[in-house]
């Protein structure tokens, strides 16, 4: 993968797109509750994207039908929002991206629905720790493999593994 160095202006545009994604994602997280269908999250995303003058990075990409990915419990990634009803104790991963002024922001996070089990909280905490380990390894002169190595070395001693088929992508 070739990494293209961005200008200060491009980085500022990426930052604006990222802030839009974060704001919309926070609105979705605030509204997650037991009894809601996952498609309700897609409706929230669509409305908020329109308010911001942005568009979904996902909808229409290779035929993807939704504005975001919603993966519940055992779904690893890229779940399509639909009629699945969220229940107390579920864990939900939201993967959301937006395009604004020609640049993209993209974030994924996992949250609990209502009260979650100790094991579910441990999973969420471990993934957050693995992310932080990866960020810490992302330094000038480091290789992409250094980042994935840090993530794997954080997760595996805690009893978790990395799904190698879905280990990341570029953004910009």
Image: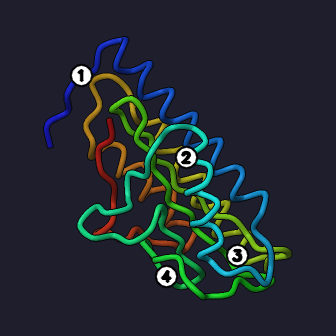
Per the image, the residue denoted by label 4 is 75
Question: Sequence-wise, which precedes: disc 2 or disc 3?
Answer: 2
Mark 2 surroundings within 10 Å by alpha-carbon count, few (fewer than 14), some (14 through 19), many (20 or more): few
Q: Position of residue 152 (x, y in %)?
A: 41, 59
Q: Which residue is mark 2?
A: 50
**Residue at the farthest right position:** 115
Would residue 102 appear left or right of 36 to someone viewing this image? left
Camera-side residue of 24 and 118: 24
Residue 38 sits in quarter: bottom right
Residue occupying image coordinates x 65% and y 72% = 40
Q: Residues within 10 Å of mark 3 (few under 14, many from 20)?
A: some
Proximity of marks 4 and 3: CB atoms separated by less than 8 Å: no
Marks 2 and 1, Cα distance to the nearest angstrom?
30 Å
What label sits on residue 120 in the rendered view?
A: 3
Up-down relation of residue 117 to residue 147 (above or below): below
Q: Nearer the viewer, residue 120 or 62?
A: 62
Are the residues tagged 1 and 4 within 8 Å (C-beta)?
no
Circles 2 and 1, Cβ within 8 Å, touching? The answer is no
Q: Which mark is residue 26?
A: none
Q: Whole-Å distance between the Cαs marked 4 and 2?
A: 28 Å
Q: Locate residue 3: give its quadrant.
A: top left
> Mark 1 or 4 closer to N-term?
1
Q: Which residue is mark 1?
A: 5
Q: CA distance from mark 2 to mark 3?
A: 34 Å
Q: How many marks?
A: 4
Q: Quarter holding the C terminus?
A: top left
Helix, strand or loop for disc 4: loop
Mark earlier in primary sequence (2, 1): 1
Q: Identify the secondary structure beneath mark 1.
A: loop
Q: Earlier in the sequence, mark 4 or mark 2?
A: 2
Which of labels 4 and 3 is toward the front? 4
- Badge 3 marks a residue whose secondary structure is helix
């Amino acid at each position: 993968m070739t990494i293209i160095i961005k200008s200060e202006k491009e980085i500022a545009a990426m930052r604006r797109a990222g802030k839009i994604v974060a704001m919309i994602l926070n609105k979705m997280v605030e509204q997650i509750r037991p009894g809601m269908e996952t498609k309700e999250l897609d409706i929230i995303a669509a409305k908020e994207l329109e308010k911001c003058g942005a568009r979904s990075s996902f909808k229409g990409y290779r035929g993807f039908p939704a504005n975001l990915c919603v993966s519940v419990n055992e779904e690893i990634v890229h779940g399509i929002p639909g009629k699945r009803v969220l229940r107390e104790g579920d864990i939900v991963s939201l993967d959301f991206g937006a395009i604004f002024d020609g640049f993209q922001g993209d974030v994924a996070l996992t949250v609990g629905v209502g009260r979650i089990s100790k094991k579910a909280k441990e999973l969420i905490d471990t993934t957050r720790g693995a992310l932080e380990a990866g960020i810490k390894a992302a330094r000038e002169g480091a290789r992409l493999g250094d980042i994935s190595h840090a993530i794997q070395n954080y997760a595996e001693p805690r009893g978790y593994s990395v799904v190698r088929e879905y280990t990341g992508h570029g953004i910009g």
